Image (cartoon, helix red, strand yellow):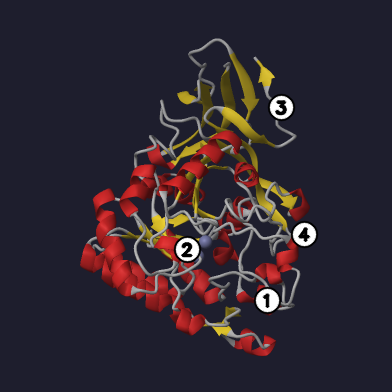
Amino acid sequence: MKHLLIQGGRIIDPSQGIDVTGSLLIAEGKILWLGKGEATPPQPDYDVLPAQGLIICPGFIDLHCHLRQPGFEEKETIATGTKAAARGGFTTICCMPNTSPPLDNQTVVEFIKAKSASEGVVRVLPIGCISKGRRGEELAEMGELASAGVIAFSDDGEPMLNSHLMRQALDYSRAFDLPVIDHCEDKTLTAGGQMNEGVISTRLGLRGIPNAAEEIMVARDLALAQLTGGRLHIAHVTTEGSVELIRRAKEKGIKVSAEVTPHHLTLTEERVIGYDTNAKVNPPLRTKRDIKALIQGLNDNTIDIIATDHAPHTEADKLCEFDLAPFGISGLETALGSLMSLVHSGEIDLVALIAKLTQEPAQIIGNKYGGLGTLATGASADVTLFDPNLEWVVEPKAFASKGRNTPLAGERLKGRVMATIFQGNLVYKDDSIKVKAK
Ligand SMILES: [Zn+2]
Ligand SMILES: [Zn+2]
């Protein structure tokens, strides 16, 4: 395999504190050399990928997505989901276990691993169920799942309502040093809920989902994490109150990490006006005030990472009355463009944003997959190149994902992934990028 030189871009690697203009040399799937300015690479023979004006950073890591396979292949497959990931700049994605059958045993984990090795274009790391069949009644074989290679446990899509089981899960997970990820929702408060509870839900005549439904479960989980010493990860934080609870828990030394999605950071409940089923998501889009708190939470590291909660559905699934539509947004391909709006507005620092998509999720996953989220010499050559200023219009029909369910259709975003390299292979490139022999 010929060496590849990514030449003359702004290299940002938060894991090494690097922010320089320079070039990156890749050989045999690994990062071989990083040179500042016009430095000449140590190898004489390579192809050149010109990166002037582009940001070069570690490949993005998504700790939370839904690939729908096995069982819901009409919505997404590992093949289409990983292609969507590559277009979004993600080189590692962690898939949630709400498949059919669910990821609650070794056989399904092996299926995901084999399928992603044969049909996937980026790394897929499975998340195993907390409970058997995701029924919340008895624990899944966590030890078996851990040895099969899951990177976390979650019943996502469903919260873990049974506090005793959640306690046991956090307790047992300590033996494997894996996090337990909870989708925090008190179902007794959200039954029939369609959107954020407030003036707009009343006006639209839709049943609301109050912030408290999330915060009650966040508070319970934090108490259980404190009790057990287990590692808790809170999925898709959406409310001001949750951010405050997590902030205080971290001050107390409770082992908790948290994520926020691009849509909860950039879109408000007003998107639901007009009954756009593509804006129907769980937890729901909230208010400006919540968004402000989420951004503050990211900036003071209360919220550790950004994860997409990519939840693809078919057009037919969403083409129905609001009440009947499934929850979820197809998010892998619009993530960077959405998030860059917060950089352009000065609300989030570019380097910090990249850290939340690379180094920070890598830390949650841990070391067993080798250096993820870094451009350190010898690390897997997982690299994302993006143009921070290129404007483009979201065309769901052009998505690699089968899920075209985005509330951003037809909107202009500023910031676009131009190329994605996974283990040294160019798995996505924009047509304007031309790789040349030296
Ligand atoms: Zn969820
Ligand atoms: Zn999810």
C-alpha distance separating marks 4 and 3:
27 Å
Mark in the foreground, 4 or 2: 2
| Residue labelled with disc 3 | 434
Q: Nearer the viewer, residue 306 or 403?
A: 403
Q: Give the x, y percent position of residue 222.
A: 31, 69
Residue 248 visible in the current orientation = no
Q: Is mark 3 within 8 Å of ligand 2?
A: no
| Residue labelled with disc 4 | 410
C-alpha distance separating marks 1 and 2:
20 Å
The amino acid type found where label 1 is placed reads Leu
Q: Earlier in the sequence, mark 4 or mark 3?
A: 4
Q: Earlier in the sequence, mark 4 or mark 2?
A: 2
Residue 239 visible in the current orientation = yes
Mark 4 residue element: loop
C-alpha distance separating marks 3 and 2:
41 Å
| Residue labelled with disc 2 | 156
Mark 3 residue element: loop
Q: Nearer the viewer, residue 306 or 234?
A: 234
Q: Earlier in the sequence, mark 1 or mark 3?
A: 1
- Residue at the image position 52 percent from the left and 23 percent from the top: 26
Q: Earlier in the sequence, mark 3 or mark 2?
A: 2
